[in-house]
Amino acid sequence: MSEAKKLCIAVRHLQFEDLGVFEEPVAKGGYEIQYIDAPVEKLDAAYEADLLFILGGPCGVYEHELYPYIKDELALAKHRIDHQLSMVGVCLGAQIIAAAAGAKVYPGTNGNEIGWGPISLTEEGRNGPLSPLLLREAPMFHWHGDTFDLPKGATLLASSELYENQIYSLGNNILGFQSHPELNPLHIEHWLIGHACELAHTPQADLLQIRANTQRYGDSLKANGVEALSNWLLTIK
């Protein structure tokens, strides 16, 4: 009899902002992947999942009165923080985890960070499982306007020129990515179409340059992201 698979639940806000290239290492790690669409589905099953992802989306954590499902996600993230249950936040997800840990989330004073740009790993980042993010001379993919203070007790792992808090860990089992190492370069057109209004109101975000840089760097970021997450999955308890 084969061993039952562990359960990974990914809380999703937009159909195209999914696990992307992270699906591969999660599946290889022995997890069955299920999605929960946060705005319309209950999060009950996510409380007991072996691994949880909270993915990206266009709403702000501080807009929870307008988008009440954010309150449910904050409660979920706090539960998993309190019990040190394995969890990864990406973009909005990283902000939700930070807020659930008591940190402030707010619009970034340096404007929207959209497109490709380098990150620098801290010493802890370089010496940890996410070190492959600096391989193959690939910059990181960014898409956010909000930022957050580093939660108390968190370890900063990476920064960008515009925003210091790009990647952090909170204990051994919780990880937050403000950036998007999960991007599947084959799906970049979904991002460009789905966020067309935001692009139109962000003059510094050059759609043609984003598309060209995705062609140039996408495969390298994919390889880096898969390797980094694979390494991290081996460290969680």
Image (cartoon, rainbow, N blue to C red):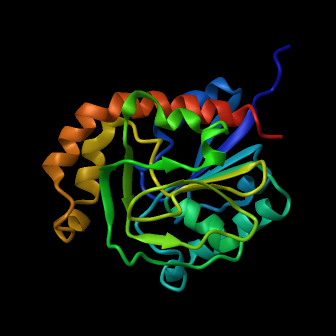
Where is 201 relative to 155, above or below? below
Q: Is residue 36 left or right of residue 59?
A: right
Foreground: 69 or 219? Answer: 219
Residue most toward the bottom? Answer: 65
Where is 66 relative to 130, above or below? below
Q: Position of residue 58 (x, y in %)?
A: 40, 66
Residue most toward the left? Answer: 208
Q: Position of residue 233 (x, y in %)?
A: 70, 35
Q: Is residue 109 left or right of residue 22?
A: left
Residue most toward the top? Answer: 1
Q: Is residue 187 left or right of residue 132?
A: left
Residue most toward the front? Answer: 123
Q: Quadrant of the N terminus?
A: top right
Q: Residue at x 48, y 83 (%)?
A: 66
Where is 82 relative to 45, above or below? below
Which quadrant holds residue 186?
top left
Q: Quadrant of the C terminus?
A: top right
Foreground: 34 or 120? Answer: 120
Count of numbered circles in the view: 0
Foreground: 190 or 100? Answer: 100
Q: Is residue 6 left or right of residue 10?
A: right
Q: Residue at x 71, y 54 (%)?
A: 46
Q: Position of residue 89 (x, y in %)?
A: 59, 55
Foreground: 150 or 188? Answer: 150
Q: Position of residue 25 (x, y in %)?
A: 59, 29
Q: Residue at x 64, y 23 (%)?
A: 28
